[in-house]
Image: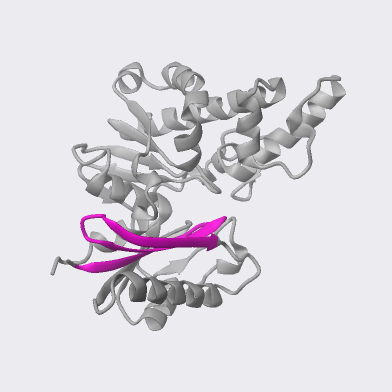
Amino acid sequence: MTLLAGLDIGGTRIGVCLGRKNGAVIASQSFPTPQAQAPSATLSQCVLILRELQERHARGETLHAIGAAVPGPFDPKSGSFGDVPNMPRWHGFDFRTQLTELAGCPVFARNDANASMLAEALWGSAQDVSNAIFLTFSTGFGAGLWLDGRLYEGPRGLAGEIGHLRLSEAGPVGFGKCGSVEAWLSGPGIVQQAELEALCAKQRGEETKLSEPHLRTEFVFEVARLGDVAALRVIQQVAKKLGQTIAILADLFDPELVILGTIGIAHYDLLEAETRRVLHEEALELTARGLRIQPSQLQLREHRAALASAASEVQPT
């Protein structure tokens, strides 16, 4: 069967995998994203890991292509990054050319939202759906659009960059804007909200675990589950903004299905009630009534979004 590789480039971690055109992952490995390292050095590290995986798990097989899921903005035609908000050293980096030269095989790259949506259409919840949207909901926030049975990326690969849309004049900062979707609905944005809520709680004389230093997104959800009132207020606000964002997308595209990535996979049970309430309050009644929202199942399996970028382009052998 055709041997493919996947590179999942994230603002927090980078993953490398070997797999097949049918979505099966043979082996994978990940490491923290080196923020201070040049992108070319990071790609060299990825290719070294890839060669080691190939030697251990697919010795003697020819690697046909590498697929990549990368943070947006990213132009799939030129293979270059735009101004990636969480990875400034990657701004303008010619990703595809560099990786092709290092790996010696074709490279097919898409932004992570589009790659994830494609994986859902190939192997996941959207296999029998004509119109669906994937929301990344991680270090950043973007939308992958599956419209009328095909991936829609726009002429420059910028369709679905909803993280840049401003939901409010004030609020946390993300994607270079106060009150943007990404500011409200990303890991760093949730931490900003939690830090502010901790200050407000202190002024009210209210105890909260959010006052601890070096907050992490996961910790905010953990203490919310334990009943921390301040943390629950943060989660309520996040759920409200998620509902507003999905309502905008629902009214624009009339999808049958919205699939949630990373944070939505781990914590949609805490977000669902308020998200649904706001969706029904703000979207057209018929649109909201017919819309399913669910966490991704595929995202629990390592780096299949990256694999999908190659699997969709390579003919089976």
Left or right position of 267 against 127:
right
Expressed as whole percent of the image width and height from the top left, the position of residue 169 reads 65, 35
- Give the quadrant of residue 12: bottom right
Measuring 44% from the left and 22% from the top, which residue is drawn there?
279
Residue at the image position 47 percent from the left and 29 percent from the top = 268
- In the rendered image, residue 75, in percent from the top left (x then y), is placed at 41, 63
Instruction: Name the residue rendered at 40%, 22% in the picture.
Output: 283
The C terminus, quarter of image: bottom left
Q: Position of residue 227 (x, y in %)?
A: 65, 20
Q: 23 and 264: which one is in front?
A: 23
Question: Which one is nearer the viewer's eye here, 268 or 114?
Answer: 268
Q: Position of residue 230 (x, y in %)?
A: 71, 24
Image coloring type: one colour
| Residue 7 magenta-highlighted | yes
Residues rendered magenta in the picture:
2-31
Q: Is residue 202 above or below residue 188?
A: above
Residue 289 quadrant: top left
Residue 294 shows up from this direction: yes
Q: Quadrant of residue 282?
A: top left
Quadrant placement of the N terminus: bottom left
User: Chief secondary structure of the magenta span?
Assistant: strand
